[in-house]
């Protein structure tokens, strides 16, 4: 009799232990799913933040006359404004309005051009892709030149550092000139604006666009 009662109590304790362990495992798995699988809840203002930033870019690289002309040295200095739509869990949209000065030296040829353009872009995280069409006007070997420059740029760190490949067409009184170039640029103005914004906690609250 005593042996039977002891066996029943042992089975009861085992059943209670199994139930308790199952409940604990369920609670732990639910907590792990909430922390590691389910993304944290964010407000619309925290999810998307659209702001204007100053842009001051300096670029340097190589250029060549099409189809296989001699290599030259090319550079740009541009000033403008950059509209960044920053998102915590979505793509980053970029709109760059800029104007500036471009120069090129190649085999005794000298080009000095003014540029103006609007460049849209999109990216994920800190890497972005931008299309950069620009209208150019200036001097090519002493002749008046007008034309277009089209480029594709890969940006890092929200566009602070960019590598661009572009094609330029220039029309002068004597002929049309096609050239390609590869440039590496650093946006000092954007870097300063982003660092200042982060230091002041610019992402902490809703932007002006979301307060309206």
Image: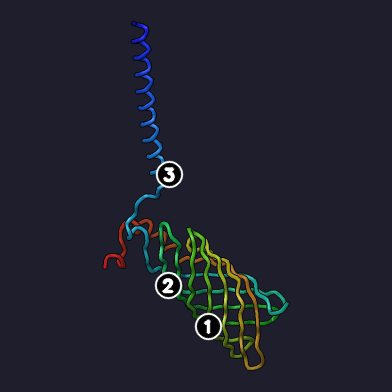
Q: Is residue 96 left or right of residue 146?
A: left
Q: Is residue 78 above or below residue 39?
A: below
Farthest residue in the bottom direction?
A: 173
Residue at image coords 41%, 57%: 88
By what rule are the colours in the image chosen? Answer: rainbow
Question: Element under label 1?
Answer: strand
The one of 56 and 117 positioned closer to us in this rendering: 117
Question: Element under label 3?
Answer: helix
Q: Which residue is mark 2?
A: 81
Real-space Cα separation, disc 3 to disc 1, in angstroms: 49 Å
Mark 2 or mark 3, whichever is nearer to me: 3
Tell me which label, 3 or 1, sits earlier in the chain.
Answer: 3
Farthest residue in the left direction?
A: 212
Tell me which label, 2 or 1, sits earlier in the chain.
Answer: 2
Real-space Cα separation, disc 2 to disc 3, in angstroms: 38 Å
Residue at image coords 41%, 62%: 86
Q: Is residue 31 above or below residue 66?
A: above
Q: Which residue is mark 3?
A: 36
Residue at image coords 64%, 86%: 141
Residues at marks 3 and 1 touching, judged by CB atoms closer than 8 Å: no
Q: Which mark is residue 135?
A: 1
The one of 44 and 29 positioned closer to us in this rendering: 29
* Figure quadrant of residue 93: bottom left
């Amino acid at each position: 009799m005593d042996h039977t009662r002891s066996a029943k109590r042992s089975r009861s304790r085992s059943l209670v232990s199994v139930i308790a362990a199952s409940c604990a495992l369920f609670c732990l798995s639910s907590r792990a799913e909430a922390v590691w699988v389910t993304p944290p809840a964010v407000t619309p203002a925290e999810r998307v933040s659209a702001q204007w930033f100053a842009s001051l870019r300096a670029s340097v690289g190589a250029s060549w006359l099409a189809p296989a002309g001699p290599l030259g040295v090319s550079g740009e200095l541009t000033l403008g404004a950059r509209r960044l739509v920053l998102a915590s869990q979505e793509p980053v949209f970029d709109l760059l309005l800029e104007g500036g000065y471009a120069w090129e030296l190649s085999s005794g040829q000298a080009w000095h051009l003014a540029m103006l353009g609007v460049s849209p872009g999109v990216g994920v995280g800190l890497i972005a892709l931008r299309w950069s069409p620009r209208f150019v006007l200036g001097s090519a070997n002493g002749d008046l030149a007008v034309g277009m420059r089209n480029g594709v740029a890969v940006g890092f760190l929200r566009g602070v550092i960019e590598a661009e490949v572009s094609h330029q067409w220039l029309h002068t009184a004597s002929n049309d000139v096609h050239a390609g170039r590869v440039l590496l640029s650093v946006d000092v103005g954007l870097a300063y604006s982003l660092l200042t914004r982060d230091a002041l906690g610019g992402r902490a609250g809703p932007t002006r666009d979301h307060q309206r």
